[in-house]
Image (spheres, rainbow, N blue to C red):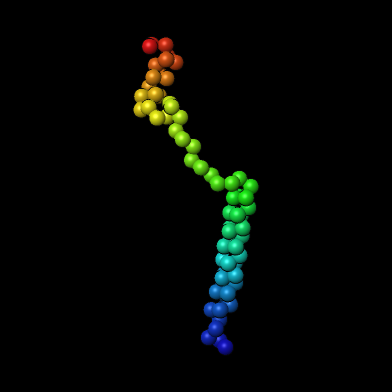
C-alpha cells in the first residue's frame, strides 16, 4: 500500500483540473448565450487608408 502514495497527490490535482475545465466550458457557453457570436468589425474608412493618421494630424495642427 505504501507504493500508491503518489495517488494521494495526483488524485486531488486531477479533480481540481477537471473542475477548472468544466467551469471554463460553462463560462464559455454562458458568455456565448449572453453576447452571441463575436464578429470582427469591418475597418472604418480612416483605418483603411495608410495616410489617414498623417492627414488627420496635419489638419489638426493647421498646416494643411
Between 55 and 16, which is closer to the camera in this rendering? 55
Residue at position x 42%, y 11% in the image: 62
Give the image location of residue 9, x and y in percent: 56, 74
- Quadrant for residue 46, please give it: top left
Instruction: Give the vertical position of 49 relative to 12 (above or below).
Output: above
Image position, residue 39 (x, y; %): 51, 42
Is 55 drawn above or below residue 16 in the view shown? above
The answer to which of 33 and 11 lies nearer the viewer is: 33
Quarter of the image with the C terminus in it: top left
Instruction: State which quarter of the image contains the N terminus.
Output: bottom right
Position in image of residue 4 (x %, y %): 55, 83
User: What residue is drawn where x is 58% and y is 58%?
Assistant: 24
At horizontal 56% and vertical 70% (from top left) the residue drawn is 14
Q: Position of residue 47 (x, y in %)?
A: 42, 29
Residue at the farthest top position: 63
**Of all residues shown, which one is farthest toward the bottom?**
1
Amino acid at each position: 500500500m505504501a507504493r500508491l502514495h503518489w495517488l494521494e497527490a495526483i488524485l486531488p490535482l486531477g479533480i481540481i483540473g477537471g473542475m477548472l475545465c468544466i467551469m471554463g466550458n460553462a463560462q464559455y457557453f454562458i458568455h456565448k448565450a449572453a453576447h452571441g457570436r463575436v464578429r470582427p468589425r469591418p475597418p472604418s474608412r480612416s483605418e483603411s487608408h495608410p495616410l489617414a493618421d498623417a492627414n488627420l494630424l496635419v489638419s489638426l495642427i493647421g498646416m494643411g
